Amino acid sequence: MAIANETVLLSVKGVSKRFGITQALSDVSVEFRAGEVHALMGENGAGKSTLGKAIAGLHKPDTGYIAIEGKQLKLGSIDDAFAAGVRIVHQELAQCPNLSVAENLCLHDMPKKSVCTVDFNEMTRRASELVHKLDPSIDVAMPLGRLSPGKRQICQIAASLEDGADRGGSSPRIIVFDEPTSSLSIAEADRLGEIVRELAQQGLTIIYVSHRMGEIFACCDRVTVLRDGKFVATNEVKDIDEAALVEQMIGRRVVTPGGKAEGELNEASALQEAAGVGGEHPHAGKVVLSAKSITSPGKLRDVSLKVRAGEVLGIGGLVGAGRSELLAAIFGLDPRATGDLTIDGNPLRIGKARASIRAGLGLVPEDRRHEGLFFDLGVDENIVAPRMPALASWSLPFGLRKIGEEARLVRERIKAFQVKTASTKSKPGELSGGNQQKLLIARWMGEETKILLLDEPTRGIDVGTKVEVYKLIREAADKGLAVLLVSSEMPELLALSDRIMVLADGVCTGTLEGDEMTQTNVLTLATRETSAA
Protein backbone atom coordinates (compact mmCIF):
# COMPACT_ATOMS: atom_id res chain seq x y z
CA MET A 1 0.00 0.00 0.00
CA ALA A 2 1.25 3.48 -0.86
CA ILE A 3 2.21 5.90 1.88
CA ALA A 4 -0.11 8.89 1.41
CA ASN A 5 -0.38 12.06 3.47
CA GLU A 6 -3.32 14.37 4.14
CA THR A 7 -2.05 17.20 1.90
CA VAL A 8 -4.43 17.91 -0.99
CA LEU A 9 -2.41 18.26 -4.18
CA LEU A 10 -5.12 18.25 -6.85
CA SER A 11 -8.64 19.68 -6.55
CA VAL A 12 -11.50 19.16 -8.99
CA LYS A 13 -14.50 21.38 -8.28
CA GLY A 14 -17.89 21.42 -9.99
CA VAL A 15 -16.62 19.95 -13.26
CA SER A 16 -19.23 19.20 -15.95
CA LYS A 17 -18.70 18.02 -19.52
CA ARG A 18 -21.19 17.32 -22.29
CA PHE A 19 -20.57 15.56 -25.60
CA GLY A 20 -23.53 16.34 -27.85
CA ILE A 21 -26.60 15.06 -26.02
CA THR A 22 -24.50 12.93 -23.64
CA GLN A 23 -23.78 14.43 -20.21
CA ALA A 24 -20.44 12.73 -19.46
CA LEU A 25 -19.75 14.61 -16.20
CA SER A 26 -22.17 16.54 -14.02
CA ASP A 27 -20.89 18.84 -11.24
CA VAL A 28 -18.13 16.48 -10.12
CA SER A 29 -15.93 17.51 -7.20
CA VAL A 30 -13.12 15.37 -5.77
CA GLU A 31 -9.75 15.91 -4.09
CA PHE A 32 -6.53 13.94 -4.59
CA ARG A 33 -3.79 13.79 -1.98
CA ALA A 34 -0.05 13.90 -2.51
CA GLY A 35 1.57 10.46 -2.60
CA GLU A 36 -1.63 8.42 -2.78
CA VAL A 37 -2.98 5.88 -5.24
CA HIS A 38 -6.54 7.10 -5.80
CA ALA A 39 -8.86 4.83 -7.78
CA LEU A 40 -11.68 6.02 -10.01
CA MET A 41 -14.40 3.39 -10.40
CA GLY A 42 -17.81 3.15 -11.98
CA GLU A 43 -19.65 1.49 -14.81
CA ASN A 44 -18.64 2.12 -18.41
CA GLY A 45 -19.94 5.55 -19.32
CA ALA A 46 -19.80 6.72 -15.69
CA GLY A 47 -17.28 9.43 -16.59
CA LYS A 48 -14.04 7.99 -15.20
CA SER A 49 -11.93 8.34 -18.33
CA THR A 50 -13.53 11.69 -19.15
CA LEU A 51 -12.52 13.03 -15.73
CA GLY A 52 -8.98 11.69 -16.12
CA LYS A 53 -8.64 13.28 -19.56
CA ALA A 54 -10.03 16.58 -18.26
CA ILE A 55 -7.36 16.61 -15.55
CA ALA A 56 -4.68 15.94 -18.19
CA GLY A 57 -5.99 18.72 -20.44
CA LEU A 58 -7.31 16.44 -23.18
CA HIS A 59 -10.93 17.50 -22.59
CA LYS A 60 -12.12 21.01 -21.79
CA PRO A 61 -14.84 20.98 -19.11
CA ASP A 62 -17.90 23.14 -19.71
CA THR A 63 -17.98 24.33 -16.08
CA GLY A 64 -15.89 24.07 -12.92
CA TYR A 65 -12.16 24.27 -12.33
CA ILE A 66 -9.12 22.08 -11.74
CA ALA A 67 -6.32 23.28 -9.48
CA ILE A 68 -2.93 22.03 -8.29
CA GLU A 69 -1.96 23.39 -4.87
CA GLY A 70 -4.57 26.12 -5.31
CA LYS A 71 -3.34 27.24 -8.74
CA GLN A 72 -6.00 26.74 -11.38
CA LEU A 73 -5.05 24.99 -14.60
CA LYS A 74 -6.10 26.31 -17.98
CA LEU A 75 -8.95 23.99 -18.87
CA GLY A 76 -8.45 21.96 -22.02
CA SER A 77 -4.74 22.80 -22.27
CA ILE A 78 -2.44 19.79 -22.57
CA ASP A 79 0.61 22.05 -22.38
CA ASP A 80 -0.55 23.74 -19.18
CA ALA A 81 -1.30 20.40 -17.52
CA PHE A 82 2.05 18.99 -18.64
CA ALA A 83 3.89 22.05 -17.35
CA ALA A 84 2.16 21.59 -14.00
CA GLY A 85 3.37 17.99 -13.80
CA VAL A 86 0.28 16.09 -15.00
CA ARG A 87 0.82 13.01 -17.16
CA ILE A 88 -1.56 10.37 -18.54
CA VAL A 89 -1.03 6.73 -19.50
CA HIS A 90 -3.79 5.72 -21.92
CA GLN A 91 -5.62 2.39 -22.02
CA GLU A 92 -4.88 1.99 -25.72
CA LEU A 93 -1.13 1.94 -26.31
CA ALA A 94 -0.32 5.06 -28.37
CA GLN A 95 2.96 3.85 -29.83
CA CYS A 96 4.75 3.10 -33.10
CA PRO A 97 5.52 -0.65 -32.99
CA ASN A 98 7.90 -0.51 -35.99
CA LEU A 99 10.20 1.98 -34.23
CA SER A 100 12.61 1.20 -31.41
CA VAL A 101 11.76 1.78 -27.76
CA ALA A 102 14.18 4.72 -27.71
CA GLU A 103 12.66 6.29 -30.82
CA ASN A 104 9.17 5.97 -29.36
CA LEU A 105 10.21 7.70 -26.15
CA CYS A 106 11.94 10.55 -27.97
CA LEU A 107 9.54 11.14 -30.87
CA HIS A 108 8.32 14.47 -29.50
CA ASP A 109 11.85 15.78 -28.96
CA MET A 110 14.52 13.98 -30.97
CA PRO A 111 18.06 14.84 -29.74
CA LYS A 112 20.16 16.23 -32.59
CA LYS A 113 23.84 16.60 -33.36
CA SER A 114 23.02 19.20 -35.98
CA VAL A 115 19.98 20.51 -37.78
CA CYS A 116 19.67 17.37 -39.91
CA THR A 117 21.36 14.68 -37.79
CA VAL A 118 19.81 12.68 -34.96
CA ASP A 119 22.01 12.02 -31.93
CA PHE A 120 21.25 8.31 -31.48
CA ASN A 121 23.64 7.92 -28.55
CA GLU A 122 21.86 10.66 -26.61
CA MET A 123 18.48 9.19 -27.58
CA THR A 124 19.52 5.77 -26.25
CA ARG A 125 20.90 7.30 -23.05
CA ARG A 126 17.76 9.32 -22.41
CA ALA A 127 15.42 6.39 -23.09
CA SER A 128 17.50 3.99 -20.97
CA GLU A 129 17.42 6.41 -18.06
CA LEU A 130 13.61 6.45 -18.14
CA VAL A 131 12.86 2.80 -18.93
CA HIS A 132 15.45 1.17 -16.71
CA LYS A 133 14.02 2.87 -13.63
CA LEU A 134 11.07 0.50 -14.10
CA ASP A 135 12.52 -2.52 -15.91
CA PRO A 136 16.29 -2.85 -16.50
CA SER A 137 15.72 -5.88 -18.75
CA ILE A 138 14.16 -3.88 -21.60
CA ASP A 139 16.49 -3.27 -24.54
CA VAL A 140 15.67 0.25 -25.74
CA ALA A 141 17.20 -0.51 -29.17
CA MET A 142 14.64 -3.28 -29.81
CA PRO A 143 11.59 -2.58 -32.00
CA LEU A 144 8.78 -1.82 -29.58
CA GLY A 145 6.38 -4.15 -31.40
CA ARG A 146 8.50 -7.15 -30.39
CA LEU A 147 7.89 -6.55 -26.68
CA SER A 148 5.06 -8.16 -24.73
CA PRO A 149 2.01 -5.97 -23.97
CA GLY A 150 3.19 -5.66 -20.37
CA LYS A 151 6.62 -4.35 -21.34
CA ARG A 152 5.06 -2.02 -23.90
CA GLN A 153 2.88 -0.64 -21.12
CA ILE A 154 5.98 -0.15 -18.97
CA CYS A 155 7.55 1.85 -21.82
CA GLN A 156 4.46 4.05 -21.97
CA ILE A 157 4.66 4.61 -18.22
CA ALA A 158 8.35 5.44 -18.59
CA ALA A 159 7.45 8.12 -21.13
CA SER A 160 5.14 9.70 -18.54
CA LEU A 161 8.05 10.04 -16.11
CA GLU A 162 9.88 12.46 -18.41
CA ASP A 163 11.08 15.64 -16.74
CA GLY A 164 9.25 18.61 -18.26
CA ALA A 165 11.86 21.20 -17.28
CA ASP A 166 13.15 21.49 -20.85
CA ARG A 167 9.62 22.43 -21.94
CA GLY A 168 9.14 25.06 -19.27
CA GLY A 169 7.36 22.71 -16.90
CA SER A 170 8.04 20.52 -13.90
CA SER A 171 8.79 16.90 -13.15
CA PRO A 172 5.75 14.57 -13.08
CA ARG A 173 3.64 15.00 -9.97
CA ILE A 174 0.34 13.44 -11.01
CA ILE A 175 -0.07 10.42 -13.32
CA VAL A 176 -3.45 9.28 -14.61
CA PHE A 177 -3.57 5.55 -15.42
CA ASP A 178 -6.57 4.76 -17.63
CA GLU A 179 -7.28 1.01 -17.48
CA PRO A 180 -3.56 0.14 -17.56
CA THR A 181 -3.98 -3.63 -17.11
CA SER A 182 -6.91 -4.33 -19.45
CA SER A 183 -4.73 -6.22 -21.95
CA LEU A 184 -2.07 -7.60 -19.60
CA SER A 185 -1.48 -11.08 -18.22
CA ILE A 186 -1.79 -11.70 -14.48
CA ALA A 187 1.99 -11.58 -14.00
CA GLU A 188 2.30 -8.35 -16.01
CA ALA A 189 -0.58 -6.78 -14.08
CA ASP A 190 1.09 -7.71 -10.78
CA ARG A 191 4.33 -6.08 -11.91
CA LEU A 192 2.45 -2.96 -12.95
CA GLY A 193 0.85 -2.82 -9.50
CA GLU A 194 4.31 -2.89 -7.95
CA ILE A 195 5.42 -0.01 -10.18
CA VAL A 196 2.35 2.03 -9.24
CA ARG A 197 3.06 1.58 -5.52
CA GLU A 198 6.74 2.47 -6.02
CA LEU A 199 5.78 5.70 -7.81
CA ALA A 200 3.37 6.68 -5.04
CA GLN A 201 6.02 6.00 -2.40
CA GLN A 202 8.24 8.44 -4.29
CA GLY A 203 5.58 11.12 -3.69
CA LEU A 204 3.66 11.03 -6.97
CA THR A 205 -0.13 11.14 -6.94
CA ILE A 206 -1.56 8.25 -8.95
CA ILE A 207 -5.10 8.41 -10.33
CA TYR A 208 -5.94 4.82 -11.14
CA VAL A 209 -8.89 3.91 -13.38
CA SER A 210 -9.63 0.19 -13.30
CA HIS A 211 -12.48 -2.34 -13.30
CA ARG A 212 -10.51 -5.03 -11.52
CA MET A 213 -11.50 -5.21 -7.88
CA GLY A 214 -8.40 -7.13 -6.90
CA GLU A 215 -6.16 -4.30 -8.11
CA ILE A 216 -8.14 -1.68 -6.21
CA PHE A 217 -7.88 -3.51 -2.90
CA ALA A 218 -4.24 -4.46 -3.49
CA CYS A 219 -2.66 -1.12 -4.30
CA CYS A 220 -5.05 1.82 -3.78
CA ASP A 221 -5.44 4.07 -0.75
CA ARG A 222 -8.78 5.66 -1.61
CA VAL A 223 -11.46 5.10 -4.23
CA THR A 224 -13.91 7.55 -5.75
CA VAL A 225 -17.04 6.15 -7.39
CA LEU A 226 -18.84 7.86 -10.28
CA ARG A 227 -22.23 6.85 -11.63
CA ASP A 228 -23.89 8.36 -14.72
CA GLY A 229 -21.35 11.17 -14.71
CA LYS A 230 -22.04 12.14 -11.11
CA PHE A 231 -19.97 11.87 -7.94
CA VAL A 232 -21.24 9.14 -5.61
CA ALA A 233 -18.65 8.78 -2.84
CA THR A 234 -14.98 8.74 -1.90
CA ASN A 235 -13.94 5.90 0.42
CA GLU A 236 -10.83 4.77 2.23
CA VAL A 237 -10.15 1.37 0.67
CA LYS A 238 -9.46 -0.17 4.07
CA ASP A 239 -12.93 0.89 5.25
CA ILE A 240 -15.04 -0.59 2.44
CA ASP A 241 -15.68 -4.10 1.17
CA GLU A 242 -16.30 -5.23 -2.37
CA ALA A 243 -20.05 -5.71 -2.04
CA ALA A 244 -20.52 -2.13 -0.82
CA LEU A 245 -18.28 -0.81 -3.60
CA VAL A 246 -20.23 -2.69 -6.27
CA GLU A 247 -23.47 -1.32 -4.78
CA GLN A 248 -22.16 2.24 -5.11
CA MET A 249 -21.12 1.59 -8.70
CA ILE A 250 -24.29 -0.01 -10.05
CA GLY A 251 -26.85 1.43 -7.65
CA ARG A 252 -28.12 -1.82 -6.22
CA ARG A 253 -27.02 -4.28 -3.57
CA VAL A 254 -25.19 -7.43 -4.70
CA VAL A 255 -24.75 -9.91 -1.86
CA THR A 256 -21.80 -12.26 -1.95
CA PRO A 257 -21.97 -15.68 -0.27
CA GLY A 258 -18.93 -15.02 1.89
CA GLY A 259 -19.68 -11.53 3.09
CA LYS A 260 -16.62 -9.37 2.51
CA ALA A 261 -15.24 -9.82 -0.98
CA GLU A 262 -11.67 -10.83 -1.54
CA GLY A 263 -10.35 -10.35 -5.07
CA GLU A 264 -11.84 -11.39 -8.36
CA LEU A 265 -13.24 -14.74 -7.16
CA ASN A 266 -15.78 -13.07 -4.90
CA GLU A 267 -16.43 -10.36 -7.48
CA ALA A 268 -17.42 -12.96 -10.06
CA SER A 269 -19.54 -14.83 -7.49
CA ALA A 270 -21.45 -11.61 -6.87
CA LEU A 271 -21.87 -11.01 -10.58
CA GLN A 272 -23.00 -14.60 -11.13
CA GLU A 273 -25.74 -14.14 -8.55
CA ALA A 274 -26.77 -10.75 -9.94
CA ALA A 275 -26.89 -12.05 -13.52
CA GLY A 276 -28.71 -15.25 -12.59
CA VAL A 277 -26.23 -17.46 -14.42
CA GLY A 278 -25.56 -19.96 -11.66
CA GLY A 279 -26.90 -23.48 -11.37
CA GLU A 280 -27.23 -26.35 -13.81
CA HIS A 281 -28.02 -25.75 -17.47
CA PRO A 282 -28.97 -28.89 -19.42
CA HIS A 283 -27.51 -29.05 -22.88
CA ALA A 284 -29.21 -32.00 -24.51
CA GLY A 285 -29.55 -30.26 -27.88
CA LYS A 286 -28.10 -31.66 -31.08
CA VAL A 287 -24.44 -31.18 -31.99
CA VAL A 288 -24.20 -27.91 -33.91
CA LEU A 289 -20.43 -27.61 -34.29
CA SER A 290 -17.98 -30.49 -34.67
CA ALA A 291 -14.26 -29.81 -35.07
CA LYS A 292 -11.81 -32.65 -35.62
CA SER A 293 -8.02 -32.58 -35.57
CA ILE A 294 -7.67 -28.78 -35.81
CA THR A 295 -3.96 -28.12 -36.33
CA SER A 296 -1.95 -24.98 -37.07
CA PRO A 297 1.87 -24.96 -37.16
CA GLY A 298 3.27 -23.55 -33.93
CA LYS A 299 -0.20 -22.87 -32.51
CA LEU A 300 -2.49 -25.92 -32.32
CA ARG A 301 -2.06 -29.70 -32.47
CA ASP A 302 -4.89 -32.11 -33.21
CA VAL A 303 -7.62 -30.33 -31.22
CA SER A 304 -11.12 -31.81 -31.46
CA LEU A 305 -14.38 -30.66 -29.88
CA LYS A 306 -18.17 -30.75 -30.16
CA VAL A 307 -20.64 -28.08 -29.08
CA ARG A 308 -24.38 -28.63 -28.76
CA ALA A 309 -27.24 -26.20 -29.21
CA GLY A 310 -27.85 -24.37 -25.94
CA GLU A 311 -24.40 -25.19 -24.52
CA VAL A 312 -21.59 -22.93 -23.37
CA LEU A 313 -18.26 -24.68 -23.86
CA GLY A 314 -15.54 -22.85 -21.96
CA ILE A 315 -11.98 -22.88 -23.25
CA GLY A 316 -9.49 -22.71 -20.38
CA GLY A 317 -5.71 -22.43 -20.28
CA LEU A 318 -2.85 -20.07 -19.59
CA VAL A 319 -1.72 -17.18 -21.79
CA GLY A 320 -0.19 -18.64 -24.97
CA ALA A 321 -2.02 -21.97 -24.65
CA GLY A 322 -3.76 -21.53 -28.00
CA ARG A 323 -7.25 -20.49 -26.88
CA SER A 324 -7.62 -17.44 -29.13
CA GLU A 325 -5.84 -19.30 -31.92
CA LEU A 326 -8.45 -22.08 -31.73
CA LEU A 327 -11.33 -19.63 -32.17
CA ALA A 328 -9.51 -17.92 -35.05
CA ALA A 329 -8.95 -21.27 -36.78
CA ILE A 330 -12.59 -22.33 -36.40
CA PHE A 331 -13.85 -18.98 -37.70
CA GLY A 332 -11.56 -19.14 -40.73
CA LEU A 333 -8.97 -16.49 -39.89
CA ASP A 334 -5.94 -18.82 -39.89
CA PRO A 335 -4.92 -19.70 -43.47
CA ARG A 336 -2.48 -22.36 -42.22
CA ALA A 337 -5.05 -24.22 -40.13
CA THR A 338 -6.13 -27.71 -41.15
CA GLY A 339 -8.79 -30.10 -39.88
CA ASP A 340 -12.44 -30.96 -40.39
CA LEU A 341 -15.39 -28.74 -39.46
CA THR A 342 -19.09 -29.51 -39.68
CA ILE A 343 -22.02 -27.20 -38.93
CA ASP A 344 -25.33 -28.99 -38.37
CA GLY A 345 -23.74 -32.04 -39.98
CA ASN A 346 -22.71 -30.13 -43.11
CA PRO A 347 -18.98 -29.85 -43.89
CA LEU A 348 -17.43 -26.37 -43.72
CA ARG A 349 -14.19 -25.59 -45.47
CA ILE A 350 -11.66 -24.42 -42.90
CA GLY A 351 -9.86 -21.13 -43.47
CA LYS A 352 -12.73 -19.26 -45.14
CA ALA A 353 -14.27 -16.60 -42.87
CA ARG A 354 -17.00 -15.61 -45.35
CA ALA A 355 -18.16 -19.21 -45.58
CA SER A 356 -18.15 -19.39 -41.76
CA ILE A 357 -20.38 -16.31 -41.51
CA ARG A 358 -22.80 -17.73 -44.10
CA ALA A 359 -22.89 -20.99 -42.13
CA GLY A 360 -23.93 -19.14 -38.96
CA LEU A 361 -20.67 -18.47 -37.06
CA GLY A 362 -20.01 -15.20 -35.29
CA LEU A 363 -16.78 -14.06 -33.59
CA VAL A 364 -16.31 -11.47 -30.83
CA PRO A 365 -12.50 -11.09 -30.78
CA GLU A 366 -10.36 -10.25 -27.79
CA ASP A 367 -9.20 -6.89 -29.20
CA ARG A 368 -12.31 -4.94 -30.16
CA ARG A 369 -10.30 -1.92 -31.28
CA HIS A 370 -7.97 -3.56 -33.77
CA GLU A 371 -9.87 -6.73 -34.68
CA GLY A 372 -13.55 -6.13 -33.91
CA LEU A 373 -15.12 -2.76 -34.64
CA PHE A 374 -14.88 -0.48 -37.67
CA PHE A 375 -14.05 2.86 -36.07
CA ASP A 376 -14.53 4.85 -39.28
CA LEU A 377 -18.11 3.58 -39.67
CA GLY A 378 -21.18 4.40 -37.63
CA VAL A 379 -22.87 2.25 -35.01
CA ASP A 380 -25.47 1.24 -37.62
CA GLU A 381 -23.01 -0.08 -40.20
CA ASN A 382 -20.99 -1.85 -37.49
CA ILE A 383 -24.11 -3.80 -36.57
CA VAL A 384 -25.27 -4.70 -40.08
CA ALA A 385 -21.83 -5.37 -41.62
CA PRO A 386 -22.11 -9.19 -41.70
CA ARG A 387 -25.81 -9.03 -42.69
CA MET A 388 -25.51 -6.65 -45.65
CA PRO A 389 -25.37 -9.38 -48.33
CA ALA A 390 -28.40 -11.16 -46.87
CA LEU A 391 -30.41 -7.94 -46.63
CA ALA A 392 -29.46 -6.58 -50.05
CA SER A 393 -31.81 -6.63 -53.04
CA TRP A 394 -29.82 -9.01 -55.18
CA SER A 395 -32.49 -8.90 -57.89
CA LEU A 396 -31.62 -5.28 -58.51
CA PRO A 397 -28.44 -4.14 -60.27
CA PHE A 398 -25.31 -4.40 -58.16
CA GLY A 399 -27.17 -5.75 -55.12
CA LEU A 400 -28.57 -2.51 -53.73
CA ARG A 401 -28.78 -2.20 -49.97
CA LYS A 402 -32.15 -2.19 -48.24
CA ILE A 403 -31.60 0.85 -46.03
CA GLY A 404 -35.02 0.54 -44.39
CA GLU A 405 -34.44 -3.10 -43.43
CA GLU A 406 -30.99 -2.25 -42.12
CA ALA A 407 -32.36 0.63 -40.03
CA ARG A 408 -35.01 -1.66 -38.53
CA LEU A 409 -32.39 -4.25 -37.62
CA VAL A 410 -30.14 -1.60 -36.07
CA ARG A 411 -32.97 -0.21 -33.92
CA GLU A 412 -33.88 -3.69 -32.72
CA ARG A 413 -30.30 -4.59 -31.81
CA ILE A 414 -29.58 -1.30 -30.05
CA LYS A 415 -32.70 -1.71 -27.95
CA ALA A 416 -32.19 -5.40 -27.21
CA PHE A 417 -28.55 -4.96 -26.17
CA GLN A 418 -29.02 -1.56 -24.51
CA VAL A 419 -26.22 0.10 -26.45
CA LYS A 420 -26.02 3.68 -25.18
CA THR A 421 -25.30 5.91 -28.16
CA ALA A 422 -26.26 9.47 -29.05
CA SER A 423 -27.15 8.40 -32.60
CA THR A 424 -27.05 5.36 -34.85
CA LYS A 425 -24.56 7.37 -36.91
CA SER A 426 -22.18 7.85 -33.95
CA LYS A 427 -18.73 6.32 -34.35
CA PRO A 428 -17.66 3.53 -31.95
CA GLY A 429 -14.91 5.80 -30.59
CA GLU A 430 -17.64 8.04 -29.14
CA LEU A 431 -18.97 5.16 -27.02
CA SER A 432 -17.68 3.93 -23.68
CA GLY A 433 -15.70 0.68 -23.61
CA GLY A 434 -18.66 -1.28 -22.27
CA ASN A 435 -20.98 0.01 -24.96
CA GLN A 436 -18.38 -0.78 -27.61
CA GLN A 437 -18.37 -4.36 -26.33
CA LYS A 438 -22.16 -4.58 -26.36
CA LEU A 439 -22.13 -3.15 -29.89
CA LEU A 440 -19.77 -5.90 -31.00
CA ILE A 441 -21.93 -8.58 -29.37
CA ALA A 442 -25.06 -7.04 -30.91
CA ARG A 443 -23.52 -7.51 -34.36
CA TRP A 444 -23.43 -11.28 -34.01
CA MET A 445 -26.12 -12.33 -31.56
CA GLY A 446 -29.04 -12.57 -33.97
CA GLU A 447 -31.25 -15.31 -35.38
CA GLU A 448 -28.79 -15.87 -38.23
CA THR A 449 -26.03 -16.90 -35.79
CA LYS A 450 -25.96 -20.55 -34.71
CA ILE A 451 -22.52 -20.60 -33.08
CA LEU A 452 -20.98 -17.69 -31.19
CA LEU A 453 -17.24 -17.57 -30.51
CA LEU A 454 -16.46 -15.26 -27.57
CA ASP A 455 -12.84 -14.32 -26.85
CA GLU A 456 -12.51 -12.50 -23.50
CA PRO A 457 -16.01 -10.95 -23.80
CA THR A 458 -15.78 -8.91 -20.57
CA ARG A 459 -12.21 -7.63 -20.85
CA GLY A 460 -11.97 -3.94 -19.99
CA ILE A 461 -15.61 -3.48 -18.96
CA ASP A 462 -17.10 -2.60 -15.60
CA VAL A 463 -19.00 -4.80 -13.18
CA GLY A 464 -22.41 -3.51 -14.19
CA THR A 465 -21.81 -4.22 -17.87
CA LYS A 466 -20.39 -7.63 -16.94
CA VAL A 467 -23.74 -8.48 -15.39
CA GLU A 468 -25.46 -7.48 -18.65
CA VAL A 469 -23.03 -9.51 -20.79
CA TYR A 470 -23.40 -12.56 -18.55
CA LYS A 471 -27.18 -12.37 -18.95
CA LEU A 472 -26.91 -11.97 -22.72
CA ILE A 473 -24.67 -15.03 -23.03
CA ARG A 474 -26.87 -17.21 -20.84
CA GLU A 475 -30.11 -16.06 -22.47
CA ALA A 476 -28.66 -16.72 -25.93
CA ALA A 477 -27.63 -20.24 -24.91
CA ASP A 478 -31.04 -20.88 -23.38
CA LYS A 479 -32.56 -20.00 -26.77
CA GLY A 480 -30.41 -22.62 -28.48
CA LEU A 481 -27.22 -20.76 -29.45
CA ALA A 482 -24.01 -22.79 -29.18
CA VAL A 483 -21.26 -20.77 -27.47
CA LEU A 484 -17.49 -21.20 -27.28
CA LEU A 485 -16.14 -18.99 -24.50
CA VAL A 486 -12.52 -18.04 -23.88
CA SER A 487 -11.91 -16.22 -20.59
CA SER A 488 -8.81 -15.59 -18.49
CA GLU A 489 -11.00 -14.80 -15.47
CA MET A 490 -11.37 -18.15 -13.75
CA PRO A 491 -14.59 -17.36 -11.86
CA GLU A 492 -16.20 -16.15 -15.08
CA LEU A 493 -15.16 -19.31 -16.90
CA LEU A 494 -16.56 -21.50 -14.12
CA ALA A 495 -19.77 -19.49 -13.77
CA LEU A 496 -20.77 -19.41 -17.43
CA SER A 497 -19.57 -22.76 -18.78
CA ASP A 498 -21.52 -26.02 -19.00
CA ARG A 499 -18.26 -27.81 -19.83
CA ILE A 500 -14.65 -26.63 -19.90
CA MET A 501 -12.03 -27.84 -22.36
CA VAL A 502 -8.49 -26.97 -21.27
CA LEU A 503 -5.56 -26.28 -23.59
CA ALA A 504 -1.82 -26.32 -22.89
CA ASP A 505 0.80 -25.59 -25.56
CA GLY A 506 -1.85 -25.89 -28.28
CA VAL A 507 -3.00 -29.34 -27.14
CA CYS A 508 -6.27 -30.33 -25.44
CA THR A 509 -5.26 -31.74 -22.05
CA GLY A 510 -8.76 -32.62 -20.86
CA THR A 511 -12.43 -31.70 -20.59
CA LEU A 512 -14.24 -31.07 -17.31
CA GLU A 513 -17.94 -31.37 -16.49
CA GLY A 514 -20.19 -30.93 -13.47
CA ASP A 515 -18.41 -31.12 -10.13
CA GLU A 516 -15.08 -31.60 -11.92
CA MET A 517 -15.15 -27.94 -12.97
CA THR A 518 -13.02 -26.39 -10.24
CA GLN A 519 -10.21 -23.86 -10.33
CA THR A 520 -7.75 -26.50 -9.13
CA ASN A 521 -8.67 -28.95 -11.88
CA VAL A 522 -8.53 -26.29 -14.60
CA LEU A 523 -5.08 -25.14 -13.49
CA THR A 524 -3.87 -28.73 -13.18
CA LEU A 525 -4.79 -29.39 -16.81
CA ALA A 526 -3.50 -26.00 -17.92
CA THR A 527 -0.03 -26.74 -16.54
CA ARG A 528 0.17 -30.35 -17.68
CA GLU A 529 3.22 -31.31 -19.71
CA THR A 530 2.46 -32.04 -23.36
CA SER A 531 4.46 -34.27 -25.66
CA ALA A 532 6.42 -32.75 -28.51
CA ALA A 533 4.85 -32.64 -31.95
Image (cartoon, grey):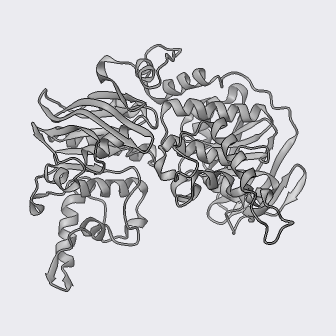
Is 130 on the left or on the right of 300, as rendered? left
Give above or below for 105 relative to 85: below
Give above or below for 174 relative to 327: above
Q: Residue at x 25, y 52 (%)?
A: 134
Is 431 on the left or on the right of 526, as rendered? left
Q: In this orientation, does residue 345 appear?
A: yes
Image quadrant containing the C terminus? bottom right
Q: Residue at x 10, y 63 (%)?
A: 166
Is 77 on the left or on the right of 526, as rendered? left
Picture quarter containing residue 523? top right
Picture quarter containing residue 79? bottom left
In the rendering, at what x and y percent does residue 323 appear? 62, 50
Is 390 on the left or on the right of 413, as rendered? right
In the rendering, at what x and y percent does residue 207 appear? 27, 39
Picture quarter containing residue 224? top left
Image quadrant containing the N terminus? top left
In the rendering, at what x and y percent does residue 249 appear? 43, 25
Q: Residue at x 36, y 29 (%)?
A: 230
Q: In this orientation, does residue 219 appear?
A: no
> Which of 38 and 446 lies nearest the eye of the viewer?
446
In the rendering, at what x and y percent does residue 201 appear? 17, 38
